[in-house]
Image (spheres, rainbow, N blue to C red):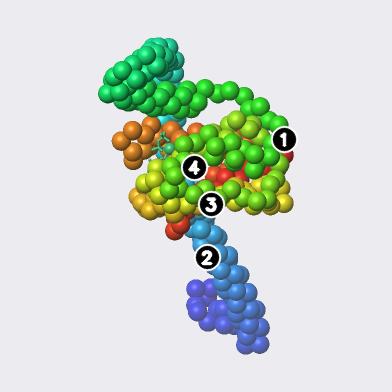
């Protein structure tokens, strides 16, 4: 009777059945722990995948932000190149008629200063204005021209002294020149422009009264020149923009001073930084 349930019972002894059962239980236990191991591994893989996904998302966002910034920079650079070329041409063409006006002012002052003092005053004002335009033109030309650096060993103290003596310092402004000195490899003329721009900004900010302290601080491979002024400081919303070309808060400013400083300092492999309370500009240049 192969279909009877008793058929199997008769085939296996109790002993055999318990052994078989025990084997089955062992097998099942082994597969259960294998499944558990696999489950742990799977969970681990899933959480690692989730982490990778998060990292990828973060990297994607960072890349998108970089692309956005670079695109803006490129657009700005392109705009500046066009403005630069245009300004350079106009500035250059304006220099000659300005020189003519300035020379004629000198002739008039020379001839009429004694007989007509009022005329001499007016002409003096014209001359002063032409000088201001001339300086602004020079700023623009300095900014757009890319003259290669003429690097030599220069004494920083000498450059500082020249920058101060060639700037017009109002009598109520004191400038403290450092006692120590250090020599660095740099383009002396350009570095003088950097220091003069920083000093002139401080003078303008201090409204003709205050103190500018200049220090030379040597480091192992570089030297810092630190300018501290007793002016009102730079408003927090203005601070991040001051090195941008054409940014100015002054009615007659061109907003190229600090941008030129940054270009010159960075072309020397250095860095320029600023902070408030008190207002401090630091120019750091490598020694070689
Ligand atoms: N020492 C300072 N104290 C306060 N504000 C300052 C100082 N130096 C710079 N600034 C701010 O930074 C801005 C940018 O300076 P930057 O020299 O580039 O241009 P500018 O002086 O306005 O014009 P210019 O092209 O004639 O130099 C200034 O308009 C001013 O608001
Ligand atoms: Mg300036």
**Mark 2 neighbour class, 10 Å CA radius: few under 14, some 14 to 19, many 20 or more:** few
Along the line of sight, the residue nearer the viewer: 94 or 275: 94
Please identify, in this view, whether the residue under mark 3 or under mark 1 is nearer the observer.
Answer: 3
Residue positioned 40% across, 42% down in the render: 204
Residue 144: x percent and y percent? 48, 24
Q: Earlier in the sequence, mark 3 or mark 1?
A: 1
Residue positioned 57% across, 45% down in the render: 283
- Residue 153 is labelled as 1
Spatial CA span between label 4 and label 2: 64 Å
Residue positioned 57% across, 78% down in the render: 8
Mark 1 secondary-structure assignment: strand
Spatial CA span between label 2 and label 3: 64 Å
- Residue 199 is labelled as 4
**Mark 1 neighbour class, 10 Å CA radius: few under 14, some 14 to 19, many 20 or more:** some
Give the answer, above or below, for where 217 lies relative to 153: below
Residue 279: x percent and y percent? 46, 53
Quarter where residue 84 is shown: top left
Q: Which residue is mark 3?
A: 213
Mark 3 secondary-structure assignment: strand
Please identify, in this view, whether the residue under mark 4 or under mark 2 is nearer the observer.
Answer: 4
Quarter where residue 86 is shown: top left
Spatial CA span between label 1 and label 4: 23 Å
- Residue 43 is labelled as 2
- Residue 57 visible to an observer of this rendering: no
């Amino acid at each position: 009777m192969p279909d009877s349930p008793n058929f199997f019972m008769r085939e296996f002894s109790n002993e055999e059945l318990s052994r078989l059962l025990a084997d089955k239980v062992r097998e099942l236990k082994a597969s259960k722990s294998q499944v558990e191991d696999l489950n742990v591994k799977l969970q681990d893989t899933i959480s690692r995948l989730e982490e990778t996904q998060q990292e990828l998302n973060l990297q994607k966002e960072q890349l998108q932000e970089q692309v956005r910034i670079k695109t803006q920079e490129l657009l700005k650079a392109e705009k500046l190149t066009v403005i630069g070329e245009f300004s350079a041409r106009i500035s250059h063409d304006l220099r000659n008629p300005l020189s003519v006006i300035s020379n004629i002012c000198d002739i008039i002052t020379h001839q009429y200063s004694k007989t007509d003092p009022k005329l001499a005053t007016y002409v003096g004002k014209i001359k002063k204005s032409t000088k201001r335009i001339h300086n602004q033109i020079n700023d623009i030309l300095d900014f757009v021209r890319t003259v290669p650096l003429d690097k030599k060993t220069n004494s920083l103290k000498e450059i500082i002294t020249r920058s101060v003596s060639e700037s017009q310092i109002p009598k109520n402004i004191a400038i403290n020149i450092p006692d120590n000195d250090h020599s660095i490899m740099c383009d002396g003329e350009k570095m003088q422009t950097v220091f003069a721009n920083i000093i002139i900004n401080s003078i303008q900010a201090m409204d003709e009264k205050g103190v500018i302290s200049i220090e030379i601080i040597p480091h192992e491979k570089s030297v810092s020149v630190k300018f501290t002024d007793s002016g009102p400081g730079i408003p927090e919303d203005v601070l991040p923009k001051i090195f941008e070309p054409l940014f100015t808060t002054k009615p007659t400013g061109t907003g190229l001073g600090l941008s030129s400083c940054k270009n010159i300092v960075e072309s020397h492999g250095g860095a320029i930084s600023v902070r408030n309370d008190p207002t401090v500009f630091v120019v750091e240049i490598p020694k070689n």
